Image: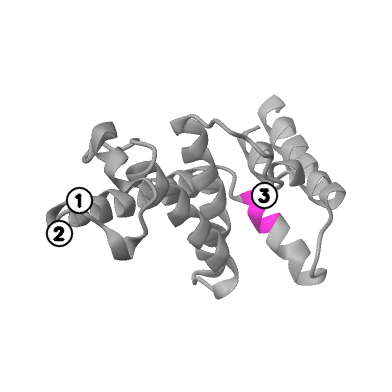
Amino acid sequence: MAWRRWATPCNCRWRKKFLSTENELKDQIAILLGGRVAEEIIFGDIVSGASKDLERALEIVRNMVTGLGMSNETGAARALQFLGQSTEERNYSEETAQLIDVEVSTRVEEGRQRAMEILNQQRAIPEDLAHALEEKEMLDGEEVEAIIRRREETAHQRQEN
């Protein structure tokens, strides 16, 4: 089930990895934005709890666009001029900066939409998790797994009937 891949504690621990594909990075972005999107879906509002996840997602996207050459607009050749630069010492035009900003915003929004689709498809699971968290402020991995398993079993029984 797609939700399990997103919710299990083992996927929350980032493994040291030297190479990542563009799709793996997109997965990480959607995962990082999942908490923020869940707040939006469940509570109808965004709270500050997911701010670090948003910062990390933006960092990954900006690196994809400016450092790894994974850009539809600036391309791989332009990535070489961004390597090792901070935003204060850029040697590219305002037009290129605007292209970067647009692409970063677009890719973050794509990650947000992907997280939204997955969470809406599996809406009952985050609702169950939210209710459990209202009763008990912290859940361990086994408790999360049990909630997901119960929901999956219920969905499976409905399909059989």
Q: Determine the secondary structure under disc 3.
A: helix
* Colour treatment of the image: one colour
Percent across and percent down for residue 118 are 52, 43
Percent across and percent down for residue 159 are 66, 28
What residue is pinned by disc 2?
A: 94
The quadrant in which the C terminus is found is top right
Percent across and percent down for residue 99 are 20, 50
What residue is pinned by disc 1?
A: 99
User: Between tags 3 and 1, which lies in front?
Assistant: 1
**Is 125 colored magenta in this rendering?**
yes
From the viewer's perspective, tell me whether residue 109 is left or right of residue 27: left
Identity, as a three-letter code, of the amino acid under mark 1: Leu
Circle 2/circle 1 CB separation < 8 Å? no
Residue shown at 45% from the left, 43% from the top: 114
What residue is pinned by disc 3?
A: 125
Q: CA distance from mark 3 to mark 2?
A: 45 Å
Residue shown at 79% from the left, 70% from the top: 137
**Is 160 colored magenta in this rendering?**
no
